Amino acid sequence: MFPAFSTALSALTADTAAIDVTGNNLANLDTSGFKASQVNFYDVMAQSLGTAAGGSEIGGGVLPISTFTNYTQGSVVGTGVSTDAAIQGNGFFVLQNADNQTLYTRDGAFKMNSDGYLVDASGNYVQGWLADNGTVTASGPTSAIQVPTNSSMAASATTTMSMNVNLDATSSSSANTYSAPIEVYDSLGNAQTLTVTFTESTTTPNSWSYAVTIPSSALTSGSSSSSSASSTSSVATGTLTFNSDGQLTSPAAGSPIALKITGLADGAATMNVNWNLYNSSGTAQITQYSEASAENSTTQNGYAAGTLTGMTVGDGGTVSASYSNGQDVTVAQLALANISNPDTLTQVGNNDLAVSTSTAAPVLGASGTGSLGKIEGSSLESSTVDMATEFTNLLAYQSSYQAASKVISTANQLMQDTIGLIQT
């Protein structure tokens, strides 16, 4: 009779532990990067009885349960938070805690701390490869990723500019004129406005003159086109020629217009700007079609001085520092770890994992290399807990618990009846 008690008691113990695992899964239903644990039950062989008909085996109940983590892919959801990151595919983010212990996680809810380090919610340092002048080599030892919070970016003077403009080819009784402004930066980071005025030739078809000017107030001295408060000084003049298809033919591709601006009133250095009339593929950016003259876009490579405003983790795991002048500078590349037997990792809390004696050596690499998955910026991986599955498991464990309880109460009743037979 006593084996019945111990067998049923082992079931009660196992079901209680299984319910605890299920409860932990449900508690982490909304935990980013959480991987649901599954429960395994194993029977206990108590004894074998020999009989005339052969051997009989009597089980001894169930062993204490074992659990394993199912590392299936969770759905990736965009968050809009610049320092969040998710892994689509295989791999783990690499962390280092204050005791220099290496940890791993699928939870990419990162942030920049007060010292400019990229950390997880527990303050562990996210590991990666640091950039050298904006270029990252994803090999060798990794280190903590930091952008000093007091860092700043020096101004950079404009050296190239371009304008995407169409000039109206519609016939008119007078010459068409169109003015297009563009903002450039001097060596001190101050914005200077250049205006390009296009004037159609009244004598030569498909020909336009251009005049580049700057406000006279921006110069200590200059060739003023008028004496008014809004007077301008000439920077450059010339002629543009188009073919019958409205395509620019002169100046030819590879011949940018050189603009030189001297004597800036703010004391900045002389500006030497190349006005590129063609893009990198050799297509002209100024056309002459029969539609209203319009400036579609402008580009230039200068910028003002800036201070650090934040950090961004982009697709592919590139970490950039963002500055108040709108510039982003690559500072690092997130490292991913490939672990061939992740089920041997040990949970240490806060969504972090540590290697055990059974864990294969982690192999580090960048996003999308080898068998590693890809990092998606401004996103998080959802928990893999399925509520329907967990509630189904709860019902099964509850039924098992009730059945084991019934075994104990039945065995107790039989024992009481047996004792009653002895006493009568």
Image: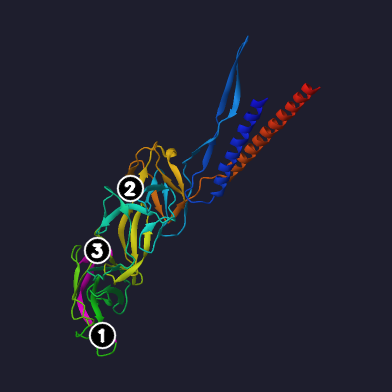
Amino acid type for the residue under numbered disc 1: Ser
The structure residue drawn at horizontal position 56% and vertical position 27%, both measured from the top left corner, is: 43
**Identity, as a three-letter code, of the amino acid under mark 2:** Ala
Q: Residue furthest top?
A: 52
Q: Position of residue 124 (x, y in %)?
A: 39, 54
**Is 63 placed left or right of 249 in the picture?**
right
Q: Residue at x 42, y 40 (%)?
A: 342
First to last magenta residue range: 230-250
Where is mark 3, residue-wise? Answer: 278
Q: Gap between marks 2 and 3, in whole Å?
A: 36 Å
Task: Tell me if mark 3 has few (under 14), some (14-19) or many (20+) residues whose alpha carbon lies within 10 angstroms of its own.
Answer: many
Q: Residues within 10 Å of mark 2 (few under 14, many from 20)?
A: many
Residue 367 can be seen, yes or no: no
Of label 2 and label 3, which has the lower sequence position? 3
Secondary structure under tag 2 reads loop
32 or 189, nearer to the observer: 32
